[in-house]
Image (cartoon, helix red, strand yellow):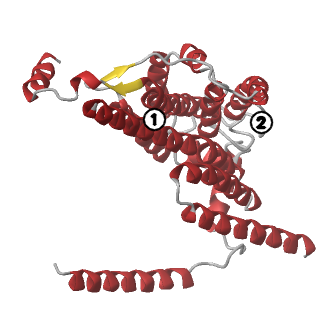
Amino acid sequence: MSSGFLTNALIAVSLTLVLVGAAVVVFTRPPSKQAVVLSVYGILLSIFFVTLQAPDVALSQVAIGTAVVPLIVVLSIRKIASIRDEARSEREGEQS
Amino acid sequence: MSRRARLTLLWIGLAAFGVAMAIAFTGLPGFGGTFHPYRDLAVVATFAHATANGVSSINFDQRGFDTFGEETILFCAVVGVATLLRPVHRERRREVRSGGRVLESTSLLVYILFPLTLVLAADVVTHGAITPGGGFQGGVVLSTGIHLLYVGGRYTLLRRLRPLAWFEQGEALGVVLFGALGLAGAALGSALFANFVPQGQLSDFISAGTVPLFNIAVGMTVCSSVVILLAGFLDQALAIRSDPGTQGDPPDADSKEEAAA
């Protein structure tokens, strides 16, 4: 039963990591930092899926949750920042 | 409704939800138990069609119609996002300078990983029926691999290497191919999405009948979808700026443009 115990220990450890990671994602306030933390959380989650013997799900998770979603978030943040910059420069242009 | 009434309603709802969840969870079989009726049926069906990857068999052979629905959802979602992200008449496209400051280690990594990722994606798609992976995973890996060029600071190269019109057609073609395979199952086999191709030997490269073909169709759709999605976001973030000259347009200018369009 030692291999069963090892598997359970592995699942417990990775589940704990996933829970801690989720908490860190939720309590990270700046969205740009949150995107990076979300990406790390995606890796933790995919490790968890591997320990639960679901490599298909882990592959999807690593590609979507770690690469695509954080990239979309970062690009959106960049777009919002550029909109704010334009609004500010326009206001300054009107004042001068 | 007053704040007090809304809070009361919230608490009633939460209490009912909690009770329902508690009943549901106490009825669940234990974690990691040996009672798996779905697995017992699915694995037998998987081996009956000589498919080594059970997940692929379930997705494309045993419940192909559900997967067709999922693929259509993805297709529609991407069409919606692409429609929202396209430049409107108050925005102009500016030239994006390539380069900027990219660490040498980053560009070295991109040069090494770019071909590796493409090969890995092809491997994941084509071996979807026999090893973990499949069309969805391989398609996403392929599209993220293409976008490594952006990480390496080569946005103009990315734009040239990624003719968007091809991917728009590839997305639609994948969905059509998927539906056609399903209809072929009805015409040549027993039912819609039936596995009508001879299945061959378990865990051979060419085995599992229609499953590899479905994997290729899904791979095309997913890869094209993610490329179109990221292209829309990249375009908005890097190239599209609001036109300062048209900010204070009189309202009739808008309606004139709309009438022209």
Residue at image location 77% in from the left, 40% down from the top: B202
Given the image, what chain letter belongs to the residue carrying mark 1? B
Q: Secondary structure at mark 1?
A: helix
Q: Position of residue B224 (x, y in %)?
A: 51, 28
Compared across the picture, whether B41 is left or right of A87 comes to right
Q: Position of residue A7 (x, y in %)?
A: 83, 68
Which residue type carries mark 1?
Answer: Ala
In the picture of the structure, the residue carrying the numbered disc 1 is B186
Q: Nearer the viewer, residue B90 or B186?
A: B90
Can you name the residue that lies furthest to the front here?
A: A96
Q: Is residue A16 above or below residue B202?
A: below
Compared across the picture, whether B237 is left or right of B108 comes to left
Compared across the picture, whether B240 is left or right of B24 comes to left
Given the image, what chain letter belongs to the residue carrying mark 2? B
Which residue type carries mark 2?
Answer: Gln
Mark 2 burial class by Cα count in 10 Å: few <14, some 14-19, many 20+? some
Q: Position of residue B121 (x, y in %)?
A: 69, 31
Residue at image location 38% in from the left, 19% down from the top: B93
In the picture of the structure, the residue carrying the numbered disc 2 is B201
Q: Nearer the viewer, residue B60 or B113?
A: B113
How far apart marks 1 and 2 lie (CA) works out to 24 Å
Q: Position of residue B240 (x, y in %)?
A: 39, 25
The quarter of the picture where the N terminus of chain B appears is bottom left
The quarter of the picture where the C terminus of chain B appears is top left
